Amino acid sequence: MSNCLVTGGAGFIGSHLVEALLERGDRVSVVDDESTGSIDNLAAVLDHPRLVYTKGTAADERLIRRLTADADEVYHLAAAVGVRLIAQSPIRTIETNIYTTELILRELGRLIDAGRTVKFFLASTSEVYGKNPKPRWTEEDDIVLGPTIRPRWSYGASKAIDEFLALAYNRERGLPTVVGRLFNVVGPRQTGAYGMVLPRLIDAALTGGPLVVHDDGRQQRSFAHVSDVVRMILALMATPAAHGGVCNIGSDRPVSILELARLVIAEVAAGSRNHHPSHSSPSAPRSSPLEIQFQSYAEAYGDDFEDCRRRVPDLSKLRRLTGLEARWTLEDVIAELVERKRKDVLSHRP
């Protein structure tokens, strides 16, 4: 049994990680300021005898010192999230990402000085690669960021600083560190509130549309189910050969955003045929098929927004270190999320 600290543990990914750690038999402490996460995400385990929840910020030095004091493993997931938040609040993005990571690492360095070593996982991001033109990104590829006048790149730059810091603590202080670069994680509890594309498309489809796709929709991403991502995180932390390095985490199946929207429409249409009209969730009239509308990045995020056209990982290192493959196909993910959303709508009807 390990003592695990999860920052951002009430968030989308963090809450699933907390559940997995409890299922593994660990004691888990969670700290979350609930700025983008929600305690509701932990509803299924909130009364668990091995869970301690603290509403607070990972930028609170006294709190972090207390929570790391008896930790064996720290999973640092607290960060600014979502394209919309990054575009609208670059100061918050930079300060949240860099300061909290530096504070936690400093505390873990202090524990090393006291003779105790704690494993550390840093949740990083594919945004670190910026707009590198390679079709698939390996962990050794160059960072190619846009100009500083475009706030979009502040996220990737701040997470790159986090990576440098974490790896420096491994090199200089011997801290067992795993840096995981996450690619487009999806699944239950994710919302579209901060620009997350799949829940946003599903919500639109189930309320009659239109489904808004940015730019021409041909930009490509790769989507992994959160349960697969959590398995990969835990496997890397348990693999000494992964310590002191960076590893891509996610799915390597590319899909365009336009194709993603069409997959959502197909699943919603198929589901509608299987639901009795009096019990189905809101959807477009049967005679009016769901429509896709295109919106420019300038309209969505402002004139200074810039995007990359393709974001797909090379997962060779992950497979070599862990032997893991994704269990969920994209179609299965969409089917699960559409069904969950339908049930959620029905459960809230008067």
Image: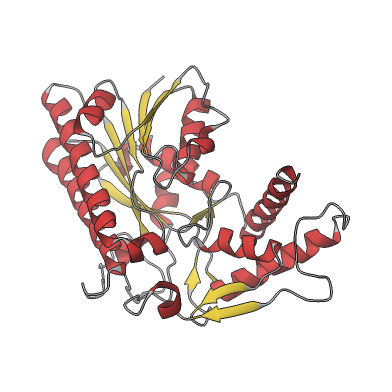
Instruction: Out of 71 and 297, give the one closest to the viewer.
Output: 297
Extreme residue toward the front, this view: 350
| Above or below 7: residue 201 | below
**Residue 323 shows in the view:** no
Q: Quadrant of the C terminus?
A: top right
In terms of image quadrants, where is residue 285? bottom right
In terms of image quadrants, where is residue 178? top left
Q: In the figure, is residue 11 to the left or right of 69?
A: right
Residue 153 locus on image (x, y percent): 28, 67
Q: Residue at x 50, y 63 (%)?
A: 222
Residue 75 locus on image (x, y percent): 35, 37
Q: In the figure, is residue 214 to the left or right of 32?
A: right
Q: Quadrant of the N terminus?
A: top left
| Above or below 269: residue 31 | above
| Above or below 283: residue 22 | above
Q: Residue at x 47, y 62 (%)?
A: 195
Q: Residue at x 63, y 54 (%)?
A: 333
Residue 70 locus on image (x, y percent): 28, 20
* Image color mode: secondary structure
Instruction: Out of 127 and 210, give the one closest to the viewer.
Output: 210
Q: Residue at x 47, y 40 (%)?
A: 38
| Number of marks | 0
Instruction: Out of 130 and 204, give the one closest to the viewer.
Output: 204
Residue 343 locus on image (x, y percent): 73, 47
| Above or below 247: residue 203 | below
Extreme residue toward the top, this view: 49
**Residue 141 shows in the view:** yes
In terms of image quadrants, where is residue 257? bottom right
